[in-house]
Amino acid sequence: MILTDFLTRTASAELVSLRQELHRRPELSGEEGETAIRIAAELERCRPDEILKGLGTHGVAAIYDSGVEGPTVLFRCELDGLPITEISTFGWRSEIEGKGHLCGHDGHMAILCGLAARLAETGPARGRVVLLFQPAEETGAGAADVIADPRFERIRPDFAFALHNLPGLPLGAVGVRSGPFTFASEGLAIRLSGRTSHAAQPEAGLSPAAVMGRLMEALPELPETLGHTPGHSLVTLSHARLGEAAFGIAPGEADIWVTIRAIDDRQQANLMGEAEKLARRLAEAGGLGVDFTRHENFAAGHNDEEAVARIEAAASALGAGRVEVGDPFRWSEDFGRFGSVAKTGLFVLGSGENHPRLHNPDFDFPDELIGPGIAMFEYITRDICGD
């Protein structure tokens, strides 16, 4: 089968309509109640053996059980949108100001609903298939919450698969690699505390300005300072604030936010610790207090060799175009957390070389990918669980 055949695997008008409906009503991480209700209603039409609701807050899981001993295979998509104002003009643009499905999670949900419809026609011959609609992917909290839910033990999988659409790649092209696939990530907020004074007498206070400047320079250079392999970790300055917006006050406090990323969880933990040590050392040398808070923790994504072989077999059999993934992606995906409980396989599906990028205000998931996404997941399903 040639690539054009793969791309002409069109989804039903109902699935496209569902995707666009979801796009109009985005909800942020941890607030996906309306979306979860809509998804559960759609799944009811596809006659799973069981539906679990409220997993890890708003998660929904549909279970298709053959009744025959065999592996449990989980496919995961995401429920949440982003706090970004959409600027597109098409008829299904977001109806909620300041919120948008600008990462494609609406399309990922439509793909999994399409897989549910296929399973309703022909269920697995052995084992179980679980379709998980996960909350709070964008903040890194959802997967951990789902896994911590006591009911997760009932659906604990042997394999877990997911896809993410990716602009910049040819439409419908599949990219995957074994081993490290997405970086670990966490935000570190640093607060430096000194003492304000009148701007005419700065010597009467204790300004954090000098230490703040040194940290803003030293933190992004930390991976190189520590001798990390180039490209395996990075520290990105994402926000900084010094004092108050007033001309009469010399500053007494400062905030620095950095996002820290690394190729694996061990190196990530080391880099987070070293960043705190550096900030503490410079603050103490300057006579300042320092406090830390951590935010949006994502585990590194590691693809299992057997799971990748299943993805590659599907892409080959379906005639999907392939792109080489030489290095892990530096962005993070909450799917990495499932690597602690199953053999995981995450792949990217090209959204088009000139398509607006993820999280851009004019991004929209290409409906042409719904059919190919369903085909990939269904092939993997039949490959592992039979038909």
Image: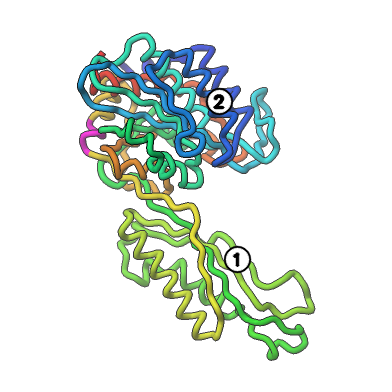
Q: Is residue 197 above or below residue 157?
A: below
- Give the magenta part as a residue range: 305-309
Point 37% across, 72% down: residue: 225
Of badges 1 and 2, nearer the viewer stands 2
Residue on which disc 2 sits: 37
Amino acid type, label 2: Ile
Question: Is residue 307 within the magenta segment?
Answer: yes
- Residue 226 point in image, percent of width and height: 34, 70
What residue is pinned by disc 1? 240
Dot 1 or dot 2, earlier in sequence: 2
Q: Is residue 375 above or below residue 32?
A: above
Q: How is the image coloured?
A: rainbow
- Magenta-drawn stretch contains 198: no
| Residue 28 sits in quarter | top right
Is 70 left or right of 279, judged from the image as shown? left
Residue at position x 24%, y 14% from top?
125
Q: Amino acid at mark 1?
A: Ala
Secondary structure beneath label 2: helix
